[in-house]
Structures are given as structure tokens and as C-alpha cells.
Amino acid sequence: MSADRRTVLLGAGALALAACSREVKSAETDLDADVEDAGTLDLDLSDLEARHGGRLGLAVASGSVNAAWRGNERFVYCSTFKMYLAAATLLRVQAGQERLDRAIPITAADMINHAPTTEKAVGLTLTVEQLMKATVELSDNPAANILIREMGGLDALRAFYRGIGDDSTRVDRLEPEMNRADGDKDTITPIQSVQNISRLLVAPDTPLNAASRVLLMRWMTETPTGQGRIKAGIPAGWTVAHKTGTGGYGPTNDIGLIQRPAGGAPIVIAVYFHATRDSTDAQREAVIADATRLALKALGHG
């Protein structure tokens, strides 16, 4: 395996993967003695980028086997953050700082673009649980902003990330401004996203209790969004719990857990594609599906 395509892989607990840059150069990472048995895979997505344009970032992990492409580069995460927002709110419920059944008034002043649940509830109330469900399943933007407001604002959301060991993800703006590319604002790396998902939904010491995990996984599994993304890149019979994110000018993302019907360790995956403006939605989703297939093949599932 050549140095310019090397992806250095660490154990699931560390997930300190080296990622290729736009020129397909990789950062070297020293392996810790405790993870000498971790898998080392070659994942090269340069052909996908060459065919479709744009910039593609992916990280994937299953047990002790991990791989990444541009894994340490930053991408605007768009609505994929709503999975983490729901997790943060569930932790507040666990701590007695919030209640699932607390009713919150929904007002016309809350309304912004893409409000499939909250727009119908203007003048009424929605519970915290209903707001989380709308945020994760339907990517309702006012619901997300309301949850952020109710937890204490963006500082509280930043504190959540730091609390799960994520010191790099940026939290700068509310919906819909946070979708706009502006330097490193509101960005994440694919490796960090996989670390976060693993910490919340896979690790034995996850801070989420069983009831919280059930709710979050249900919303991520039942979401109708992103049928052409990760879901389209997995074999028949496999299932996905995921959260999509989309920017009108090209960003097309999908993150989550893939589960094989035979069981075993789930496959944690995060794909961020900053497509060209002239590409179609279908083309952008197809790139994520193709990247998913290549990642699964690298893990020995294709």
C-alpha cells in the first residue's frame, strides 16, 4: 500500500485515523501498542471524486477495524447535527433537567424554512419528545432551534460535545444559517462523527441509558429521509439507523449505524459530500451510496 493512499487505523475506542487530503496525501499516525491488532485497510475514493467533482469525506468503523478518506478534514454538517441535539436533550432528561412530556408553545415567531411538524402546531404545543422526533425523523428546523433554546442555547450544545469527548466539532449558528459554508463554522470531521456515534450508541459505557437509546435509534431507523444515500449502498436485508443533512448549494451528508441481519458488531459510518452546485440531488445521493459500498467492501462485506 503506497504512502499516499495509506489509512492508519486504530481501535474502536481511539479511532484516531489518518485521512487523505485533497491531493491524496495522508497523515501518518503512530500505532499505540495496545491496538497492534487493529485492522489496516486501504480506502481510496479518489475515483468517485474525479467522476463527480466536489469533496468527499468518509469514516467507517466496525469493532477494531476502521478506515477513512479525508477523515480529518472539516465538512459543514448541516442537519446531521440533529441526531446529536436529540442525544443532548435525552441526557438532560436523564439528569432530571428536562421532561419528555413537557409541553412547549409553538409560535409563528419560531417558524423558518422546513417545518413539516412545527408549522402545523403554531398556536398549539408540542412536547419535548415530539420536538425531538420531528427533529430527527423529519429534520424540522424550528423544532431544532426550539430544543437548542430550551437547553440554554448554543453554549449548552457545545458543552454536550465536549462532555462526550469531542473537542473539535464547531457549534456557531442556529438553523438555517448554520448550513452556510463560512470557514470552519458549524463543521465536523468524519472521524470525529464516527467517534461520537460510537460513544453514544455502541460503547458499553455510553452516557445514554437504555430507554434513551431506544428512542434515538427508533427515530433514526424510522426516518423517511435519505433513501438514496447510505440505505441505497447496503445489501438487501441490512438495516440503517441514520441522520441526513443537506445544503441547498451542494452539501449532502448521511451518518449512522448499519446493522447486518446476522448480527455482530454494528458498522458506524459518516459520509459528508460537498458536491458541485451543478450536480443534481440524485447524483449527490448516488455518490454517498457508492462510497458506502466501497467502505463496506473495504471491511470485507462486498
Image (cartoon, rainbow, N blue to C red):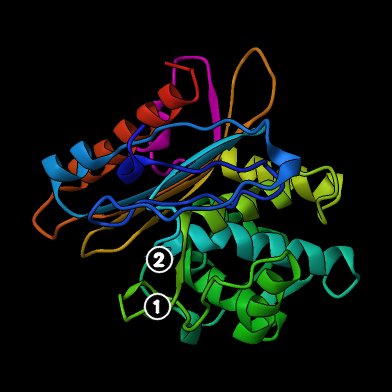
Residue under label 2: 74
Q: Report the front residue among 221 and 101.
A: 221
Q: Amino acid at mark 2?
A: Arg
Residue 92 pos. (x, y %):
81, 69
In the rendered image, the quadrant that contains the N terminus is: top left
- Please rate how many residues cluster around mark 2, counting C-alpha atoms within 10 Å: few if below 14, some from 14 to 19, many from 20: many
Tell me where the magenta segment starts and ends, as one range: 223-240
Please tell me which residue is depicted at 59% across the width and 77% down the height of the picture.
146
Residue beneath the point at 30% across and 31% down: 290
User: Is residue 137 positioned above or below 118 on the image?
Assistant: above
The residue located at (33%, 80%) in the rendering is: 183
Check whether the beta carbons of the residues at disc 2 and disc 1 lie within 8 A of each other.
yes
Image coords of residue 108 (percent x, y): 47, 83
What secondary structure characterizes most of the magenta part?
Answer: loop
How packed mark 1 is, by other alpha carbons closer than 10 Å (few <14, some 14-19, many 20 or more), is some
Rendered image: mark on residue 184:
1
